[in-house]
Structure formats: C-alpha cells, structure tokens
Image (cartoon, helix red, strand yellow):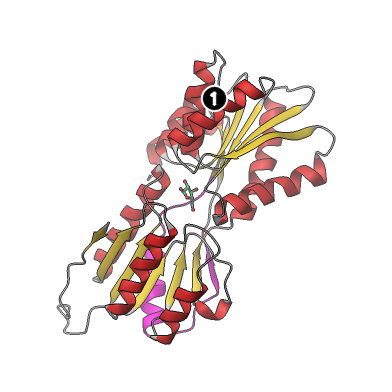
Amino acid sequence: KEDEGSGGDSGSGGSKKITLGFSQVGSESGWRSANTDSVKSAAKEAGYNLKFSDAQQKQENQISAIRSYIAQKVDVIAFSPVVVTGWDAILKEAQAAKIPVVLTDRSVESDESLFVTLVGSDFTDEGRRAAKILEKVLEKAGHKGKVKIAQLEGTTGAAPAIERAKGFKEIMDAEHKDDWEIVVSQTGDFTRAGGKQVMAAFLQSNPDINVLYAHNDDMGLGAIQAIEAAGKKPGKDILIVTVDGVKDGFIAMSEGKINAIVECNPLLGPQLMEVVQKVHDGEKVERWIKTEESDFMQDQAKDALPTRKY
Ligand code: AHR
C-alpha cells in the first residue's frame, strides 16, 4: 500500500524540497499507528515530500518499496525493518545509487557501512527493564513460590522480539535462576489477535502460569481477553508486564489488569526528520540516536493516563 507524497520540487523559500521515501513495517499495533502518525506529521511540518508505504509486515513488500524509491531517485530512504536479516542486497542497491539510508525504530544485521544511523530504542535494555520491574510487581503482590512465566514474543526475527527476549533472559539467568522459569514462549506477531490466540493455547497447556511477559501492549491486551475467558483474573491470578505504553495499555493498567509497563516511545518523527536533514546536508550524525523512555507501575497509571500522547 503506497501513499503518494504531496509534492512539487520547491518549497516557499525556493529551495528544493527533500524527498523522503519511508517504508513502514505495517499497522500491527497501537504503537505502530502512533509511529506512522508521528512520521507523517513531522515530515509535513518539516516541509518534506514524503513517499510513504505500508509493508503489511512483509519483508518482500519493504524491499520492493525501497527499490521503487531508488528508481524514483528520492533524496533519502528511511525504513523500519520488519526483521533483522536479508537486507544486504537492497541496501547495496541504495548505496550504489548514492541514496543514504536511515534506519528507524528497528535495526538490521548488515554491514554498518550500508546505512547511516538508527533512530530508535534500546530493545535489549527494555527486556532488562521488564525483568527488573517484574521483581517489583512480584514483591508488591506478595508472590511466594516459583515464578512460571509465559512469554508472548513479537514477530519472529524482528529486532524488538529478539532483543526484548535477550535482555529479560539476561537478568533472569543472572539473578533468578532458581525461582523464575519461562515455561512457554511463542510469537503473537505483535498483534492483539495473536496475543489472544496464543495465550488461550498457553492456558490449556500450562494452567499453572502465574506471570505473563508480553513484548508489546497489544499482545498483552489480547491475552487479557483469553485469561478472562478462562475464568482467571488478569493482574491478580496472572501478573502481567508489557512493553510500549500505548493509551489502551494504560487504561488496562488503571483497571488493574496490567501490573507494569516498560515504555517504548513511538514518537520518532521529529527526531527522524532532523536526522534526514543532516544526512541530506552531508553532516555527520551519531550511529545510534537512542530514545528516552520510562517504566510505569500500576499505581502510576491513573495519574499518567491523561497526559499520555499516544
Ligand atoms: O518495533 C517496535 C515494536 O513494534 C513495538 O513495540 C510493537 O508494538 C510494534 O509492533
């Protein structure tokens, strides 16, 4: 799906408008919708000619979008890669055409010379933060005995799925080897429907699960429906930690159904546009421009809700 940019060649100041080709992952989650809105409005604000396409979570769609941006000779290409591998060939095509590539949100496993920078979060640290906040959740709930964790993973092969699992496991192995165990772990593809379906199966196969760690709010929200359908209380019988911090996640947290949220900020548009301008002007930029984020416990949800921007 492609939205054509609005654009002539010159802005009101007479200088040539920057044409930015942006390939978005899809529209799988509330986080993604907020990210898309942020990119579109920041591009408008910056006066760029934005060519935007939604890959519907398919790598082949992203590759053809990028190839078409190369053919159209855009000034800069930005994209949020659905998975980490398989990008070398298309990145080399962009390099051969002398079009700089900026990664946003997610990273790739490619030679670093093939892209200029990454504007996005530290997902491994988000995984560590999820484990650390789970310690607080367990303490607050007065939990005794084994911690039997179900993990809802993001899209298989995607940076946030790999790294959020890795960071969480790092803390678990170092500090909770004897009392925490991930008893089931499967992808819910970052969607609400996926979270619901996979959690329903988890509850059948492992009725003794007492913690859910979901790699995003949407899967957590879907899982809540499955937990309630199984006659259990989310946030009580099963303690829940999710990642993102979208409004619906905060609403569920203020209702006592999610115990803690690790924030992942989707409002990357303004920072991305600044970087695009610098890259276009040939200025040096850092290799990784990291996003600032916070963590939230349930008792902060009601106060934080009115000021959530997404
Ligand atoms: O890459 C960021 C992740 O992608 C968000 O956490 C998730 O909600 C989205 O789909």
In the displayed structure, 173 sits above or below 107; it is above
Left or right for 181, reference 156: right
Residue 279: x percent and y percent? Answer: 41, 80
Q: Quadrant of the N terminus?
A: bottom left
Percent x, y for residue 27? 36, 48
Residue behind mark 1: 200
What SS does tag 1 mark? helix
Who is closer to the viewer here, 126 or 86? 86
> Is 280 within the magenta?
yes
Q: Quadrant of the C terminus?
A: top left
Would you place residue 270 above or below residue 36 in this image?
below
Q: Is residue 128 left or right of residue 279?
A: right
Within the magenta stretch, is there residue 9?
A: no
For badge 1, the amino acid type reads: Ala
The reply to whether residue 273 is visible in this rendering is no
Q: Residue at x 34, y 54 (%)?
A: 36
Residue at left offset 52%, top offset 39%: 188
Residue 177 drawn at (x, y percent): 83, 39
Q: Where in the figure is residue 22, as x and y percent of width and height?
A: 34, 66
**Magenta region, residue range:** 263-291
Check the image and report above or below for 57 versus 19.
above
Q: How busy is the neighbourhood of tag 1: few (under 14 within 10 Å), some, or many (20 plus)? A: many
Which quadrant holds residue 144?
top right
